[in-house]
Amino acid sequence: MKIMMFAHDGSLNRGCEAIVRSSAALLKGGLKQSKIYLASGKPESDKGIPQLDGVYDGAAVPIRKYSADWWISSMRVKWFRDESYALGRIHRNIINRIGDMDVLLSIGGDNYCYGEQPGWYEIDKRIKEKGKKLVLWGCSIGEEDMSPRKLADLKLFDLILTRETLTYNMLRSKGLHQVRLVADPAFTMEKEELELPEGWVEGNTVGINFSPLVSQRNPGSREAVEGLIRHILETTDMAIALTPHVMEHGNNDYELLKELHASYRDTGRVLLLPDHCSAVQYKGYIARMRFFVGARTHATIAAYSNCVPTLVLGYSVKSKGIARDLFGEEKLVLDLGELSDGDKLIGGFRTLLAEEKEIRETLRKALPGIQAKSGKAVQYIKELVYG
């Protein structure tokens, strides 16, 4: 069986890398004769990922102005309001690979949380026109993200695998009966432990991940995070490890955290992890932290999956749904609108301190079931293909 993952924009986002790494390992482990391929928007960033049998250039290709494709596209849009030809040419790097595959996995996770996605809709339509199996792999989608056009696209999928219960329940309520509940594949990803950096206090280091995405959406959140850093420095003897997880142009955690590090470096207790580690290496660092405070979903999954008590700076249904499935409630997840409230951040951190043992024990008990759900995704693929 030949399987191609698509809707992936490269591994500069270590969360995307974590999805690819763990998904490829799960698929290879459960489908012994399978070949796993990846169509990537930045294929050079994915070359170090094991278990892949090939990485293809899946980047969108702009239509050159005044070319034949440009004229044809313009006329179809103007006269027939038909963008299918244009989208087909723009996404031809992926579309041209469809015929060689048996199953195609749309793996973006939260791609459907950011408005309409006409490019993906066109690819999905072409996949079904060629009679191939189409799977939405490990997704999260909020009720507020749904639209008639998006629902029509979702109906094309042979199988929709949701990574948390909130999305599962919402999609089932929309009449989508091909939906199954799993868990994010990254809960099963391995870790690589590098030498700990200078300033790290073993057993007493708290990790903080903050992102430009959250900072832009709630401008007051940065001041609140700085307030949390000062609170930790003033009231505990912990070290703080600023932990980047996405290094994309215009959305670079490292650049933002570097500014924070400059403000607190002289305390001798705040360190900045490097920007060149792989997803498994960041997970290796996070696994040895006492607590973790994070905005990036897969940085928090790295913490959860190592039983590290975690405060999530959440901004979508995925954060809430994952916490609910682990704890039975949306525990220690702050909504985007709450992130400018410094008292709530500090209050969340105090809860980590007060309930440290209980949180670790809850995670320890929950993880086997969550990881089994991650693996269940492969069984659903088997049932789809072989009946």
Image (tube, rainbow, N blue to C red):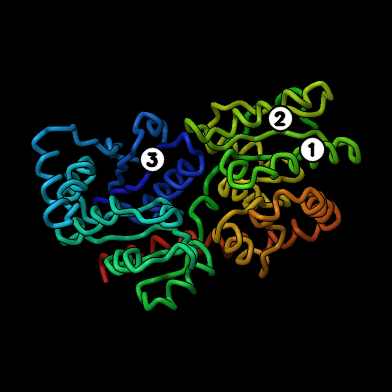
What is the distance, in whole Å, between disc 3 and disc 1 at their CAs?
A: 32 Å
Q: Position of residue 357 (x, y in %)?
A: 81, 56
Residue receiving disc 3: 9
Tell me: residue 139, above or below residue 65.
Answer: below
Q: Secondary structure at mark 1?
A: helix
Residue receiving disc 1: 229
Q: Say few, some or many: other residues with alpha carbon within 10 Å of mark 1 (under 14 / 14 to 19 / 20 or more).
A: some
Residues at discs 2 and 1 in contact (Cβ within 8 Å): yes
Relative to the observer, which residue lies in front, 116 or 369?
Answer: 116
What is the distance, in whole Å, between disc 2 and disc 1 at their CAs?
A: 9 Å
Residue sticking out furthest to the front? 78
Q: Is residue 54 visible?
A: no
**Picture disc at residue 260:** 2
What is the distance, in whole Å, between disc 2 and disc 3 at their CAs?
A: 27 Å
Residues at discs 2 and 3 in contact (Cβ within 8 Å): no
Q: Earlier in the sequence, mark 3 or mark 1?
A: 3
Is 259 displayed left or right of 253 in the figure?
right
**Quadrant of the image for the N terminus?**
bottom left
Q: Amino acid at mark 3?
A: Asp
Q: Amino acid at mark 1?
A: Ile
Q: Amino acid at mark 2?
A: Leu
Relative to the observer, which residue lies in front, 58 or 228?
Answer: 228
